[in-house]
Image: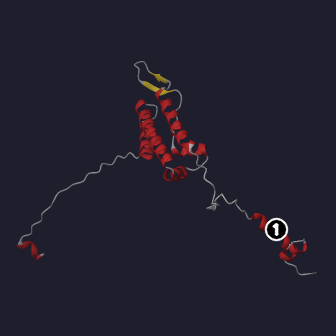
């Protein structure tokens, strides 16, 4: 029995240096003179499209329109008991699912494309308004509204207080014995 390794087996089935040489020569691309050859930077092409800017704002705006015209059930004195049609919060992560990317990808697009960055700021402002309105109208429980505003809009319970004062300490001779 001959001792063959896998490389010699390949050679036995007809591996040919001439074929390999022809394949590599056909892969070389020569551009016509008036065109500039742009080197591929590598990596996967971006999924970003300029039309996402308008689509993002429209998607969040549609959520705001759902809020301004909900079907409401009231009690005898006119207080809102509940909203009959559930209105789900619109989030950046939700839009990312629609587009087929991750939320981090949208953040990257916002930093790389100024127009998309402006669209993201507008969408977040609409999202904040929606959360405030849904909480104020009773469509969302107060705890959920507060949760949304704190996590998606940067609201906090914390109050920052800064004090500008001077403290003067005086020591007596009797205090220096310590």
* Viewer-nearest residue: 130 or 177: 130
What residue sits right under mark 1 in the picture? 22
Q: Is residue 18 above or below residue 120?
A: below
Render colour scheme: secondary structure
Percent x, y of residue 122: 45, 41
Percent x, y of residue 53: 53, 42
For the N terminus, the image quarter is: bottom right
- Tally the marks: 1
For the C terminus, the image quarter is: bottom left
Q: Is residue 30 above or below residue 66?
A: below
Find the residue positioned furthest to the front: 34
Q: Is residue 161 above or below residue 56?
A: below
Does residue 177 appear left or right of residue 109 in this picture? left
Tell me the residue at 72%/62% (across/down). 30
* Viewer-nearest residue: 147 or 58: 58
Find the residue positioned furthest to the top: 76
Percent x, y of residue 177: 10, 76
Q: Is residue 106 above or below residue 69?
A: below
Find the residue positioned furthest to the left: 173
Percent x, y of residue 74: 45, 22
Determine whether the residue tagged by mark 1 lies in a helix, strand or loop: helix
Question: Quadrant location of residue 19?
Answer: bottom right
- Label 1 Cα crowd, 10 Å radius (few <14 / some 14-19 / many 20+): few
Tell me the residue at 10%/75% (across/down). 176
């Amino acid at each position: 029995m001959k001792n063959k390794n896998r490389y010699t087996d390949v050679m036995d089935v007809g591996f040919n240096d001439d074929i390999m040489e022809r394949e590599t020569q056909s892969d070389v691309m020569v551009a016509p003179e008036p065109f500039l050859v742009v080197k591929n930077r590598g990596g996967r092409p971006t999924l970003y499209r300029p039309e996402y800017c308008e689509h993002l704002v429209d998607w969040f705006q549609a959520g705001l329109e759902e809020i301004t015209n909900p079907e409401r059930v009231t009690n005898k004195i006119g207080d809102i008991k509940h909203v009959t049609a559930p209105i789900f919060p619109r989030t950046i992560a939700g839009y990312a699912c629609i587009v087929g990317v991750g939320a981090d990808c949208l953040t990257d697009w916002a930093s790389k494309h100024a127009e998309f960055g402006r669209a993201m700021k507008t969408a977040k402002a609409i999202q904040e308004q929606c959360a405030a309105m849904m909480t104020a109208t009773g469509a969302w429980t107060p705890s959920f509204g507060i949760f949304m505003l704190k996590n998606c809009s940067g609201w906090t319970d914390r109050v920052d207080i800064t004090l500008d004062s001077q403290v003067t300490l005086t020591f007596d001779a009797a205090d220096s014995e310590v």
